[in-house]
Amino acid sequence: MYKQYLPFAIELAKEAGEFIFPYAGKAGRQTLKAAKDFVTEMDVKVEKLIIQRIQGQYPEHRIFSEEAGSIDGKADFEWVIDPIDGTINYSVGVPLYGVSIALTFQNQPVVAAISLPALGETYWAAKGEGAFQDGKPLKVRKADLSEAFVSIGDFAKDGNTEINQERLNTIAHFVNDIYRLRMIGTAAVTLAYIASGRLDLGVYYKPNFYDIAAGELIIAEAGGTKKTAGNYTVFGHPQTVEQLIALLSKAAE
């Protein structure tokens, strides 16, 4: 039912990735969105390219993008876009960034594509059709929590001391029960890596939908899941997610 939209999503993610790749580390003028949070000229330019392509192909579809916000349409389909996920990494030339594109139907992701241009990788999925990296089927890794590589989201962009302290306290409740802790700086890379078995869990504090929409579907189609405990959303293999959710729930008591 949804697979027909997948080739367009894949090609669009690839095109957008190729568009931004030459400018990594030299992305143009930065504009301050909020404390410690920037948007570069390339965020705006590639977002415009993506929106133009979608409107040219599916003019009736709605669009929601990180920088442009909501664009109305007549259909129940909505494209959810993060034009450059990992903008800070991208702006200084760290190769961990990506383009994240999802198509949702009645607010549920049904098609997803993530381009990681600096790594030469593209990930995709359609609901009920499995998940792939450049044509290779993906499967989340089954690992006990004690053997798990866990990636966490960034700390509060606005430097909110209270929220950052909560995150530190939460990490303290599970850091001794896992194998390694990582902060990648981009949900697109983290969730793609979970789907491919390079990471085991992703832990995010109140994640934005545009950050996780594509990765959520790719992980689900690779046999993974998403669960929420309090303010935290966890992605990974169902067994490992349950183990971490138990610790997070205990921490919230």
Image: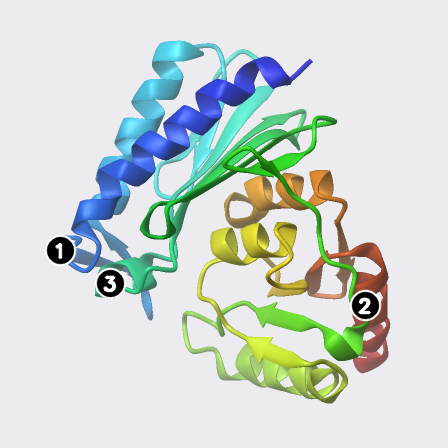
Q: Number of callouts in the render? A: 3
Above or below: residue 45 compared with residue 88: above
- In the shown orientation, is residue 177 left or right of residue 159? right
Does any portion of residue 208 appear in the rendered image? no
Above or below: residue 71 compared with residue 100: above
Specify the amino acid type for callout 2: Ile
Judged by depth in the image, the label closer to the viewer, 3 or 2, is 3
Above or below: residue 123 compared with residue 180: above
Q: Which residue is mark 1?
A: 29
Q: Residue at x 67, y 25 (%)?
A: 106
| C-alpha gap between disc 3 and disc 2 | 34 Å
Q: In terms of secondary structure, where does tag 2 sit? A: helix
| Mark 2 nearby-residue class (10 Å; few <14, some 14–19, many ≥20) | many
Q: In terms of secondary structure, where does tag 1 sit? A: loop
Residue 143's tag is none
Above or below: residue 51 compared with residue 220: above
Q: Which residue is mark 2?
A: 245
Specify the amino acid type for callout 3: Gly
Q: Residue at x 17, y 50 (%)?
A: 23
Q: Residue at x 80, y 81 (%)?
A: 251
- In the shown orientation, is residue 134 left or right of residue 40? right
Closer to the N terminus: mark 3 or mark 2? 3
The quadrant holding residue 69 is top left
